[in-house]
Image: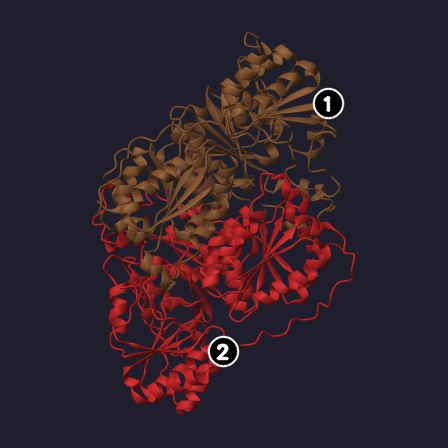
Chain colours: A brown, B red
Amino acid sequence: MNGAQALVQALQHSGVDTCFANPGTSEMHFVAALDGAQGLRCVLGLFEGVATGAADGYWRMAGRPAATLLHLGPGLANGLANLHNAKKARSGIVNIVGDHATGHLALDAPLTSDLEGVARPMSHWVHRVASADAVAAAGREAVQQARRRPGHIATLALAADAAWSPLSLPLPDLGPLPEPAFEPLQQPALQAAVDLLRRDPGGTLLLLGGAAMRQEAIAWAGRIAAHTGCGLMSEFYVERAARGAGRVPVPRLPYAVEPAMAALAPWRQIVLVHAMPPVAFFAYPGKPGRLEAPGTGFVHFSHHGQDATAALEALADALGARQARPVLAAARDRGAALPTGALDAAGIAAVIAGVLPEQAIVVDEAISTGRSFDAATRQAAPHDWLANMGGAIGFGLPVAVGAALAAPGRRVLALEGDGSAMYTPQALWTLAREGLDVTAVIFANRSYQILRGEFAGVGAGEPGPRAAGMLSLDRPALDWVQLSKGFGVPATRVHDLAQLADALRRSFATPGPSLIEAVL
Amino acid sequence: MNGAQALVQALQHSGVDTCFANPGTSEMHFVAALDGAQGLRCVLGLFEGVATGAADGYWRMAGRPAATLLHLGPGLANGLANLHNAKKARSGIVNIVGDHATGHLALDAPLTSDLEGVARPMSHWVHRVASADAVAAAGREAVQQARRRPGHIATLALAADAAWSPLSLPLPDLGPLPEPAFEPLQQPALQAAVDLLRRDPGGTLLLLGGAAMRQEAIAWAGRIAAHTGCGLMSEFYVERAARGAGRVPVPRLPYAVEPAMAALAPWRQIVLVHAMPPVAFFAYPGKPGRLEAPGTGFVHFSHHGQDATAALEALADALGARQARPVLAAARDRGAALPTGALDAAGIAAVIAGVLPEQAIVVDEAISTGRSFDAATRQAAPHDWLANMGGAIGFGLPVAVGAALAAPGRRVLALEGDGSAMYTPQALWTLAREGLDVTAVIFANRSYQILRGEFAGVGAGEPGPRAAGMLSLDRPALDWVQLSKGFGVPATRVHDLAQLADALRRSFATPGPSLIEAVL
């Protein structure tokens, strides 16, 4: 047995069943070891950002880490932007990064780089393993790190000679990893929230984030709101929010500074449930970075190292709200006509709400088009909504790959801006190869539309011709239908809401991936 | 005047005339400042690796740095792989990376990351500027750093508030930068080379790299070889090699370990002219990393901080070789018939040699297909050959963008593997938008063909079905004609050598970009 084979065994015994790979020479022994590993599914991406984004999506839906297999420092570098997003989403990922053999590093061959330096900004844990006998324990430790609560990014640099050398010692014990523990809820935080919700429920907002937006957690939050009369809201970005008919509707904090401040202005106190004090996405001249009204009080109730459902259940119990009946989102009348006409944001949202299948997974990178989808989709069939937590674009299609692999049988709907989809279009090929049930909708406004707003927002005035050229994606227009077919994914183009509804229905009814270019 | 405007002025006064941009909100003031800057051409890329690769190509052909404009840590991260290649090519680049406003960083908004940490592994110089008054001097310093000999990667983190705030002090002096100085040639090194070439010229190899492969430098090397009888060879990777008819032919060291060792075995001494002792690209079990025969002597004659042409001229003078007549590559008989038949590497090379236009720029990322092009193209029309110095794939199409912009009127021929082109296909859109005279040939073997060889090379045996799946790009086959058209670049597919020759001739005769998919 060599080090690569030992690593594959360690990953499998630690519960890793999926590896998103873009390998090179230094990873060939790991690839060879896959032939003997029936339980480890290896999925090829044609760019590293596909692999890291897929691992993020996999964690969000499976709740356990996938591995990535990347090629030296530059390969890891190509995966960093989606590792940034995954880190902000608190997703657990095990990156296996092959490096030159130990003796080769001193020769400064072309691909030599500071691998650990590349890893560190987007990893919680970085470790180099340079001997075959140390590989299994290091791999197991990497999985354990990734499975912490919340999830961590664990990056293991695997020297090529550690992978190819035979073990001289027996494998260490590779039994299953213990279940990672949550930190307990702090009694003073619980008491502070209880006091507030008893004293001034009408002035108090429960701001939910992270795991507090899963189905069971919002059910408890809904009971608390029904019992006390407090408000409910979620952070703008949530890595996986349970939404739709029959669930507690939790409105999102708006993205833009002014509407976000307006939404928070009525509240005298905010109870942070797996959430941070709300801040602006970007800084703007003369505008505040913090979004709450001056003088707003905060209770830091629970954080991402704790069990959100248990915390909210404890709060409900302390308030006597266990039997309260929460307000639930009504189901949309399935017989109601869908809107027709031009492709505007409100119409698109209504169409999506009307045709979304049960238990769909929506991956939201619709950027400027998608910001207003929240209210209109609350009565859609029950679904999960996955947002880009780090703001690095190129997140959506890769995350759709991982989500679809983690949740077979559920349709994934990836909502993409044309600008953002262009960062990782290679993910389409993996969708085709794996035959994944993913519908990608590209909102083709043929510009960095969000930047047109931001240009004004930062006080830069009106763009002149040279500046405007930096914000437009026309000249030439990207043809997403041809691009998609080039990657092996069937595609169609729609120009109005009726065509969009038809195309979505057809896609949802057809196994495998398809792409819809919605020309705005 | 605000900080962004001051930066644009500083770049222009320091000789920067081109900026490869993929901006976001934090860069909007810089974009706005472009409207007032007629002398700074700003070129949009739809992915950051396009921008950094283009800057590399620009330096190689223009000999002066371009700027890039990138969006925070994750945007810089997407550009790192091509910065790695540029760093190994000793290209000078000025990266302007917008960051959050200084006060906003503490709020940990989604896009916050360790920007300097991301920059450091692929930069020689990293600097943060957080006040408008400091921007101009910092920008000027960044250009000065980039223009060092050899070129450096200079990364300037520009806080958004430094960009948008008005200056409170007058602009510092922004006169042209002084010409960067070369280090002088060391007399003991010169003497050692002279002694060797007098004592044992038949056993001595001049190994040329970097700027020693430019046209004037190889002319001196050719005179030295003609006068003394010593051997000439170049490193396998050279960032810009002058080649073709009427120039001194300098064979490349082979890529693979065994042929490289065979090529070096005859030489008792190697004089390193802007070159390193030759090493294997990767380590392989049981094979050496150093490629010279045991006991080979080395003279470290000159390095990349020195003037290669002046160094070789001095050596020629010291040897009395100034008047020697070097062997020059004969011109291919333009009337000779081109080979026809199946698309194999030898035939492809002969076709390229036959149709390449005068002063073409060849960007070589043909990987497994292109390794044997060296000998067959030595008699082509005079051209420059640009190799991937860092080994991070996704280099070719972006470098072609920058080379074409730096050398208008010269045809760029980008030779791409299908695997490697897939890392940065977004560059095709920039070729279309800017109407650049670039011919991209995609060698579609529909696999990571190089890895099939490497799999055996590292001793992993024969790939089983799961391993083979990680090395193949079929299921589905990428359709490069559709992909190219989707990006706005006309494309055609060829299946034999005659079709390839026709398609190349047509492309060379047609202004603007086109793509040829050569199905192997």
Q: Chain of mark 2?
A: B
Q: Callout 1: few (<14), some (14-19), or many (20+) C-alpha neighbours within 10 Å?
A: some
> Which kind of residue does numbered mark 2 sit on?
Asp
- In percent of width and height, residue B137 lies at 68, 63
Question: Is the Cβ of the residue at disc 1 closer than 8 Å to that at disc 2?
Answer: no
Q: Is residue B238 left or right of residue A231?
A: left
User: Does the rendering let one see residue A141?
Assistant: yes
Q: Is residue B17 left or right of residue A164?
A: right
Disc 1 is placed on an element classified as loop
Give x and y (percent) for residue B300: 39, 77
Label disc, if present, on residue A266 of the rendered structure: 1
| Callout 2 crowding tier (Cα within 10 Å): few <14, some 14–19, many ≥20 | many
Residue B255 x %, y %: 31, 64
User: Residue at the location (65% across, 21% down)?
Assistant: A205
Location of residue B219 with respect to A230 vertically, above or below: below
Q: Amino acid at mark 1?
A: Pro
Tell me the residue that label 2 is attached to: B307
Q: How many marks?
A: 2
Q: Nearer the viewer, residue A278 or A510?
A: A278
Q: What subunit carries mark 1? A: A
Look at 36% across and 68% down and name the residue there: B353
Rendering coords of residue B483 (x, y %): 44, 46
Which quarter of the rendering shows the N terminus of chain B?
A: bottom right
Disc 2, SS = loop
